[in-house]
Image (tube, coloured by chain):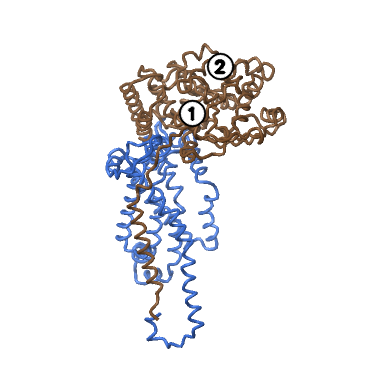
Chain colours: A blue, B brown
Amino acid sequence: MASTAGTAPVTTAPASDDSSRRRGLTGYVLLVPGVVWLALFFVIPFYSLVATSLYDPGGSVFSGYEMSYQFSNYWHAIQDYWEPLLRSLWYAGLATLICLVLGYVLAYAIAFKAGRWKNLMLVLVIAPFFTSFLVRTLSWKLILADGGLIVNSLQAVHLLGPDGRLLATPFAVICGIVYNFLPFMVLPLFASIDKIDHRLIEASSDLYANPFVGFWKVTWPLSLPGVVSGTLLTFIPAAGDYINAQLLGSPNQRMVGNVIQNLFTQANDYPAAGALSMILMILIVAMVLFYVRRAGTEELL
Amino acid sequence: MTGLTRRGLLHGGGAVAFAGVSLAALKLPLFGVSGAKQVPADCRATDLSDTEKKVIVSNWPAYIDPRKKSTSTASVFTERTGIEVDYTDDINDNAEFFAKVKNQLGSCQTINRDMIIMTDWMAARMIGLGWIQPLDADKIPNVHKNLIEPLRNRQWDKDLKFHAPWQAGLTGIAYNAAKVPEVKSFEELLTRSDLKGRMTLLSEMRDTMAFMLRVVGADPDKFTDAEWSKAIDRLQEVVASGQVRSFTGNEYIQDLAAGNIVACEAWSGDVIQAQFDNPDIKFVTPEEGLSLWADNMMVPNLAEHQANAEAWMNYYYEPEVAAKLAAWVNYICPVEGAKQEMEKIDPSLVDNKLIFPDNEDLVDAFDFMPLTDQQSQQYEGDFNDVIVG
């Protein structure tokens, strides 16, 4: 306020000064719920997770855990579980790519071609959320069942051997992830594509760009914010997902989420579970930062 | 006026927050966890049973006859004793329930329950942690008199000082007779090529590893580290070969019914219930032996109505009541004499070996040896590493 004194005519009456200060305070008061929320549900759990990952691995529920800054927990976790860790990133990456292709086509169609069906189609994209994640994943078990229609048809055309199956394969797991996270890709893509001014695309063809070139030079760059947020919203939860691998995969498709869950609940190995959670988090944050840098859309974050 | 600008204050706030967080970082040891072991005698509540006529029971779903009916076992109990039963079926999984009550029981706080029902190994673990109150033998004479022989002398509580079995069951093999020939042994389950990728094992470490130990010629009642390694290596091989489709909890039964799997390691009660819909599903007790387990009633620390809980235990060990319960839940009835009572209720169930097995059959049933804290940590870890691939 002092800095603006020179430019603005200083005729503030004491009363209005008072009210502006009160207004100033209101801002902070309004911040309180958010800050409390973050402290309670992010900062404290986060620190407890950091602490857990550094516990003395010799501890147990019986004897308790001592905090001994065991950074070697991280190294051991990587040594023991690098396979599911890489597998998670691979599955999540592949699923994100498939989601991007499917989602882009769908979002493009809804934004530009759906006409008066636009709202209905958007509702249909969200509709699966009306039932629970678990139920929808379980129904994929029915779709891909060994004696089911899809497997039988594929066997009839000899794309699958007579003993072939789809369930309990990487295919089923990736299908599940793609299906479950597709809406997270479609919605941000739609928001971006819907905003594109149609006249820009027309202009590109007026300037003799064929549709292909027009798409890559105009539509794609303009939809980039949607692509970036869509891929992030898909990739991050997909990398940590464990439901799809649990229900649709076999032990040879386990992802890092399964390992963490089992370490916490079954094996009671809290330090390893904590370290693995931290590694996953660090990996994802690093990849996201790198990705956002490369995509040149820092303003998203 | 050179006052605070909003930006300045935010920066200041940020700095304070950062300092606080750094301080928290230095104080990380605060997050260390002390041991969860308790002494039951120090965590005893005054028994209000005489003044408050109620008992709070936590059990597994579908593990009691429908309570609303006036002739149900629970209603008759209330009618006879005047004790109201506050019953919840909130136990779905041993490990999950353990995680739920760990913080309270581990620091001598009440979980507001008078009775919980846990499977053998978890019961053993909780008793070992000192979370369970000793029972008054004089108040539960029926338990001591009527418990069937095979469930006595469990290594972890030989004199029934802390527990009374609620229902028992067998772990064995289930297969779909319409699709594959009989699977007689665990060895067959692990090696037969027509089962490859179409069979599942249980994700409970003790259930699966007891059989793996038998397969490599060891005794689950008493085995060495070397034998354990041999068993776990064998399991690793089987998993790597793609024989095992998955490690599951109860959900194997849907897969078996849907035909996604043709054989699996299974619990007897699940199979009886599945047989009502699909008679082709068969239960086999493997050649390696019988694995008998029980879910056990126990009184947790700081329970306020222990005497009422004991009255409930005693009541369910009356043969007539036990038969009524067994007719509904279809698990192995742990009460001697219930078989005779069953003649009056439902004669068709009397000869069902999965509800009333002959005691001779159960003689060679094996138990999993009690594990020390370190063993349990190591074995659970080894098993977990195999099942998560």
Q: Residues within 10 Å of mark 1 (few under 14, many from 20)?
A: many
x, y percent for residue B30: 37, 48
Q: Circle 2 sits in a helix, a strand or a loop, which is it? A: loop
Q: Is residue A205 left or right of residue B93?
A: left
Q: Residue A158: image x %, image y %?
A: 40, 34
x then y, percent, for residue B236: 34, 28
Q: Residue furthest top?
A: B360
Q: Is residue B320 left or right of residue A31?
A: right
Residue A112, can we see it? no
Location of residue B117 by image quarter:
top right
- Disc 1 target residue: B123
State the SS at label 1.
Answer: helix
> Residue at 51% of width from left, 18% of height from top?
B152
| Above or below B64: residue A188 | below
Looking at the picture, which amino acid does disc 2 mark? Ile
Q: Are marks 1 and 2 in contact (CB under 8 Å)?
A: no
Question: Label 2 is found on which chain of the structure?
Answer: B
What number is the disc on residue B148? 2
Please tell me if label 1 and label 2 are on a single chain. Answer: yes
Number of dots carrying numbers = 2
Q: Quadrant of the C terminus of chain B?
A: top left
Q: Which mark is residue B96?
A: none
Residue A244 figure quarter = top left
| Subunit of label 1 | B
Say which of B310 and A214 sits in front.
B310
- Decide which of B229, B125 is in the foreground and name it: B125
Q: Amino acid at mark 1?
A: Ala
- The image quadrant where one finds the N terminus of chain B is bottom left
x then y, percent, for residue B338:
63, 17
